[in-house]
């Protein structure tokens, strides 16, 4: 008798509930996201743990976290969910026109690397529809874990949120403090961080990858309170605001590289050498990538090499 490839007692609802509880770190928010009752989600998790004969979640804290066995199962469950989604898409008779690669672009790369990569990809035999998602790191990491993104390009996230994910380093870059040419500090040959205090600061939000690096620079430089702070992930808004006001825009250098090159913005003479950080590709671990996703990844690698070579 042929052996079943999958225990018939394990249903898709078990996998869906497990992945959502892991993402939400709790049964209640997971039930709301799935549109199910809390008892139904709890029952599915209990059934799955019984079938696997192991505890998948550590319930000792306020939020549910994966056990070691849960981490192992999560990697395979996420890969399986992504494979099912791709399989459903591939059933479309007009597959070539409906295939889509979904990538997340953090602010670090959405101005130079990703546009170059997409343009390069569109001239390959694997060209298809590309969906580019932008936003805070936490939002896109959640989408990646859920299978709603194929990969993310940008700065390396903190180690505690990289469980089940892998990172491919492409290059490193540092932060810059950009202002309009007429800014009172623009022409000063050297600056201390305390001299920034009288001016408005355009900052990444608290949950952004580069925010701890920015805060560390301020602490090390002895900077105290600023005139006022504006938090944003919108490069368009920040650029417009910096050009119209004496605000100081704190951002990864590649984001404003073109502005600096043409003289639209000026980099303040601050020591930002301590802000160097890795930029690369974040993916789900142990996942078999489709041919088109691999082709776009290659285009990202080539575009990143061009940007890094330019300095």
Image: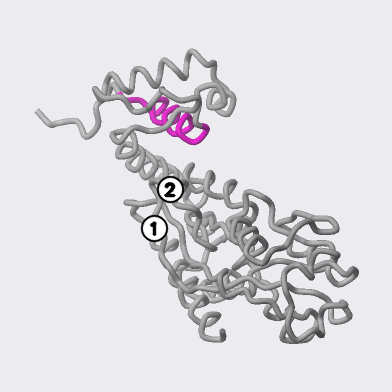
| Left or right of residue 276, residue 12 in this image | left
Residue at disc 1, secondary structure: loop
Residue 274 versus residue 84 in the image, above or below? below
**Viewer-side residue, 172 vs 52:** 172
- The residue tagged 2 is 86
> Dividing the picture into quarters, in which one does residue 235 lie?
bottom right
Q: Earlier in the sequence, mark 2 or mark 1?
A: 2
The secondary structure that most of the magenta stretch takes on is helix
Q: Is residue 82 visible?
A: yes
Q: CA distance from mark 2 to mark 1?
A: 8 Å
Q: Which region is colored magenta?
A: 10-24
Q: How far across and down, in percent of the image, does residue 198 sit?
A: 85, 64
Q: Quadrant of the C terminus?
A: bottom right
Q: How far across and down, in percent of the image, does residue 267 sit?
A: 73, 79
Label 1 crowding class (10 Å Cα cut-off): few <14, some 14-19, many 20+?
few
Residue 18 versus residue 179 in the image, above or below? above
Q: Residue furthest front?
A: 222
Q: How far across and down, in percent of the image, does residue 94 sit?
A: 50, 54
Name the residue at 69% across, 57% down. Answer: 204
**Viewer-side residue, 35 vs 113:** 113
Asked if the stretch drawn in magenta spans residue 13, the answer is: yes
> Dividing the picture into quarters, in which one does residue 187 lie?
bottom right
**Viewer-side residue, 145 vs 69:** 69
- The residue tagged 1 is 290
Q: Residue furthest top?
A: 39
| Left or right of residue 186, residue 277 in this image | left
């Amino acid at each position: 008798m042929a052996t079943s490839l999958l225990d018939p007692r394990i249903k898709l609802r078990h996998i869906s509930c497990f992945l959502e509880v892991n993402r939400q770190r709790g049964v209640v928010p997971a039930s709301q996201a799935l549109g199910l009752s809390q008892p139904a989600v709890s029952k599915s998790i209990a059934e799955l743990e019984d079938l696997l004969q192991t505890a998948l979640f550590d319930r000792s804290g306020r939020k549910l976290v994966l056990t070691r066995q849960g981490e192992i199962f999560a990697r395979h469950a996420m890969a399986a969910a992504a494979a099912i989604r791709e399989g459903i898409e591939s059933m479309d008779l007009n597959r070539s026109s409906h295939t889509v690669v979904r990538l997340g672009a953090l602010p670090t790369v959405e101005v130079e690397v990703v546009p170059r990569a997409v343009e390069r990809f569109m001239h390959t035999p694997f060209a298809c529809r590309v969906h580019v998602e932008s936003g805070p790191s936490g939002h896109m990491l959640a989408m990646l874990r859920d299978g709603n993104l194929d990969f993310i390009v940008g700065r390396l996230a903190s180690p505690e949120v990289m469980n089940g994910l892998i990172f491919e380093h492409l290059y490193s870059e540092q932060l810059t403090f950009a202002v309009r040419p007429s800014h009172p500090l623009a022409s000063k040959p050297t600056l201390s961080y305390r001299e920034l205090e009288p001016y408005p600061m355009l900052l990444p939000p608290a949950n952004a990858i580069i925010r701890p690096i920015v805060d560390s620079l301020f602490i090390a430089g002895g900077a105290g309170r600023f005139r006022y702070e504006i938090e944003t992930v919108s490069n368009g808004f920040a650029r417009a605001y910096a050009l119209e006001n004496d605000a100081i825009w704190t951002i990864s250098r590649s984001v404003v590289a073109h502005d600096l090159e043409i003289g639209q913005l000026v980099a303040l003479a601050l020591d930002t050498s301590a802000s160097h950080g890795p930029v690369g590709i974040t993916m789900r671990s142990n996942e078999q990538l489709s041919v088109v996703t691999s082709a776009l990844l290659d285009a990202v690698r080539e575009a990143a090499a061009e940007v890094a070579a330019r300095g």
